[in-house]
Image (cartoon, helix red, strand yellow):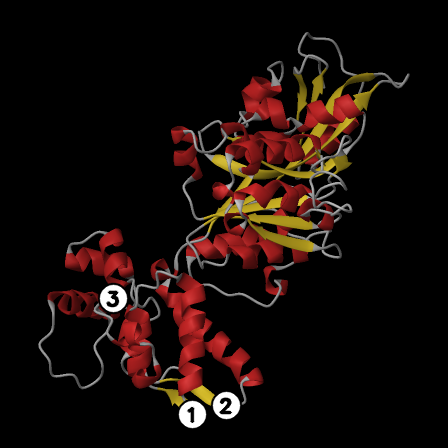
Amino acid sequence: MHHPLGKPFPCTSLCSFIMDSVADGIFTVDREWNIIFFSQSASDIVGMSAEAAVGRKCWEVFRTEGCNEQCVLKQCIAEDRKIVGRVMIVEREDGTQVAVSVSAAPLKDQAGNVIGGVESFRDLSTAPGKRSVGKLPKGFYSRDPGMAEILRILPQVAESEATVLLLGESGTGKEFFARAIHDLSPRHKGPFVAVNCGALPEHLMESELFGYKAGAFTDARRDKPGRFQLADGGTILLDEIGDLPLPLQAKILRVLQERVFEPLGGVTGVAADVRVIAATNRDLERMVTEGGFRQDLYFRLNVVRMTLPPLRERRGDIPPLVDASLKRRSLTGGKDIEGLSQEAMRLLMAHPFPGNIRELENILEYACILCPGGLIQVEHLPADVRTCEHPGPRPAGSTAPMTMEEIRHQAAVEAVERNGGNRNAACRELGISKDTLRRILNRAEDNPLDVSNQVWT
């Protein structure tokens, strides 16, 4: 191993060989942030050879957004301590991005003087987790590739201390995933505190989040802890964070940067031993551009970003979600609900679900109230679902004229069946793109023809 200026670095060739053999990427820097050593695994993850990396500044190699503010090496050297399990996004040499779990420590000489830093990082897209997805709290399943990817990396994200930003429409399950991250994390024995920022009156937001001291205002007769203090040792979910006013955004930024906050009327800071998860259904990037959200806070929150797809984009998940919901209700409702009739399921598969999973749960609760037992029929569904005009698979035995949408759908399904399920071959036969075929079949990924030819349970 050699210093970029040609001087031998104090490490044996055996040590270098060992570090090159470790699956985690490893690199070291001197006090000027020049890379001194770059392991083979680091080269594989980043996509840059050791020869190209050694001698360059670390930020030139990793190109991490907000690198100066979030630099783990800078923090560990300044505080003379090890830092473990931070999750960051790095940009590879080819422009693609990858989430990595980072650990760092000061690098010292024999006299104990800090001469640089050493950092290891693990590619979360390939690293096996300490906990399996099958152990997710309450159980969860999805056929959607995007959701499946989120589930796959969730245990690794949970094991870290990284700030997480959950994006998605209302009702897509952001709080569910926040709780799952907490339950799978080393903080799982601590409290989980959820705060709906959009539901708090603006004049009470600061005291609700950070608490207040006795005498802070007229009715403050005693100290009151805020949500951050109540979440000490655990996790806080800042739901609808896009609704926070700019002055409070600055205070949240301070918590994330300095891990300290001041109660209203207080004169000394209070340590914030809490992991922050933020969630919103708003477009924060657009809000930053328009001046409604602080850019520096957005970068602080956007360490690990998970975008939850709406239910209308993963209709193949509706049958298993229905099945799981009805099983839960059968244990508590006292009714023997066997499932849905074919026409009731057809209407659910065609419904646009603007309220997503939360709306599906409400629909099923309504249906279970009206259904005396057995199969849920169309008449047990809410009126807006019964009158849904969105096209779905045709019910068995229907003699009404087919719409153009139904003709396209049937032709696509039959082409896939003729080609033994090979969708690429079906695309070639129909002369359409894969995206077009996917859109046509999107209403029922799990073999749409079966939706109208069987009872769903």
Left or right of residue 449: residue 320: right
Q: Amino acid at mark 1?
A: Pro
Residue 359, percent from left and from top: 41, 67
- Asked if 68 appears above or below 122 in the picture, the reply is above
Residue 180, percent from left and from top: 61, 58
Q: Residue at x 78, y 32 (%)?
A: 82
Q: Spatial distance from mark 1 to mark 3, Cα to Cα? A: 39 Å
Q: Residue at x 41, y 35 (%)?
A: 287
Dot 3, how many residues are within 10 Å of its Cα: few (below 14), some (14-19), or many (20+)? many
Q: Spatial distance from mark 2 to mark 3, Cα to Cα? A: 40 Å
Q: Secondary structure at mark 2?
A: loop
Residue labelled with disc 2 = 335
Residue labelled with disc 3 = 416
Q: Amino acid at mark 2?
A: Lys
Residue labelled with disc 1 = 372
Dot 1, how many residues are within 10 Å of its Cα: few (below 14), some (14-19), or many (20+)? few
Disc on the earlier residue, 2 or 1: 2
Left or right of residue 271: residue 321: left
- Asked if one can make out residue 454 in the rendered structure from this viewpoint, the answer is no
Quarter placement of the C terminus: bottom left
Left or right of residue 247: residue 72: right
Q: Secondary structure at mark 3?
A: helix
Marks 2 & 1, CB-CB < 8 Å contact: yes
- In the rendered image, the residue lying farthest to the front is 218
Q: Secondary structure at mark 1?
A: loop
Residue 439, percent from left and from top: 26, 57
Q: Spatial distance from mark 2 to mark 1, Cα to Cα? A: 7 Å
Dot 2, how many residues are within 10 Å of its Cα: few (below 14), some (14-19), or many (20+)? some
- Asked if one can make out residue 42 in the rendered structure from this viewpoint, the answer is yes
Residue 46, percent from left and from top: 55, 31
